[in-house]
Image (cartoon, grey):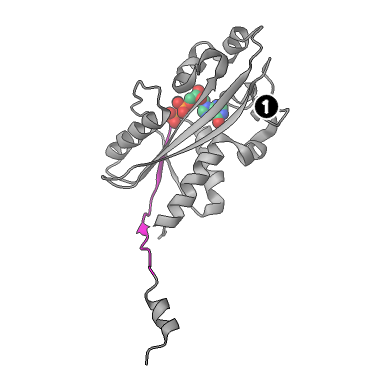
Amino acid sequence: MMNQGASAVGNKKRTVKHLIRKLYFVTTNRNKFREVQEILKPFGIRITHKNQDLLEIQSRNIDLVAQVKARDAYSRFMMNPVLVDDSGVFIDAFSGFPGVNSAYAYKTIGLDGFIRLMKGVRDRRAVFVTSVAFKPDSTHDFVFRGEVHGAIAKRLVGTRWGYDPIFIPKGHSKTYAEMGAVGKNAISHRKKAFEAFARFFNEHYCQRFK
Ligand code: ITT
């Protein structure tokens, strides 16, 4: 007679994980790549950097911008699984500006421009957002979002990249730049987004290396 316990184990649902060997992280921004590499390390996920400018649509929806970027990356890299990151700083007093246009604002007015624009502005609240899009195959794409609320500093503090010298995460007194790589990576918008991705990835996918 069959042992009930054994039969129950036999009936246990098995989830088949999809195998992904190479996972391309497509970005023109080396700093992003370094941060993401560190965040994914503890999850055992390896990424390969591809330096490629991608299609960025005009939309206020950062998740959609990331999704379209991932589709573009997927077709450019011969249908290889890809990962992209679209990030931005959304300033409350400016109704979310620069938001999805953060790269353009950085290149044009720069951080000094933001310090000037915000002179005398009392409400300094802002949200740093990262939207990660993962496209493993031609029919699926997945988006994961990470957000950190904070404030815009009154002057540049610290010397890291991008908006790091002017963003002070809530509950902290230092800018991301002052926190350094390890401190920032422990709490950042990017860490939140990529952790959500990593948990999902490890549940449904696996990587094997030759
Ligand atoms: P890719 O699109 O090629 O990935 P990018 O630098 O243009 O690179 P984004 O559009 O996502 O990427 O970034 C918008 C701007 O925000 C850009 O000026 C970045 O340097 C800056 N940025 C993004 N993440 C940041 C972070 O964690 N700390 C500081 N600045 C950041």
> What's the magenta region?
13-28
Q: Quadrant of residue 114?
A: top right
Residue in the picture at 41% in, 60% down:
208
On screen, residue 16 above or below 80:
below
Q: Position of residue 130 (x, y in %)?
A: 49, 33
Q: Position of residue 157 (x, y in %)?
A: 69, 21
Left or right? Give the position of 48 relative to 57. Answer: right
Secondary structure mostly seen in the magenta stretch: loop
Name the image quarter holding the C terminus: bottom left
Residue in the picture at 36% in, 30% down:
64
From this viewpoint, is residue 206 visible? Answer: no
On screen, residue 183 above or below 101:
below
Q: Position of residue 36 (x, y in %)?
A: 52, 41
From this viewpoint, is residue 182 visible? Answer: yes
Any magenta on residue 21? Answer: yes
Identify the residue under disc 1.
Answer: 175
Left or right? Give the position of 172 relative to 137. Answer: right
Q: Does dot 1 land on a helix, a strand or a loop?
A: loop
Residue in the picture at 40% in, 72% down:
12
Disc 1 residue type? Thr
Q: Position of residue 92 (x, y in %)?
A: 56, 18
Any magenta on residue 169? Answer: no
Residue density around tag 1, few if under 14, some if 14–19, many if 20 or more, within 10 Å:
many
The CB of the residue at mark 1 lies under 8 Å from ligand 1 = no
The answer to which of 81 and 141 lies nearer the viewer is 141
Looking at this view, name the residue that lies furthest to the right.
Answer: 173
Q: Quadrant of residue 59?
A: top left
Looking at this view, name the residue that lies furthest to the bottom.
Answer: 1
Name the image quarter holding the N terminus: bottom left
On screen, residue 60 above or below 45:
above
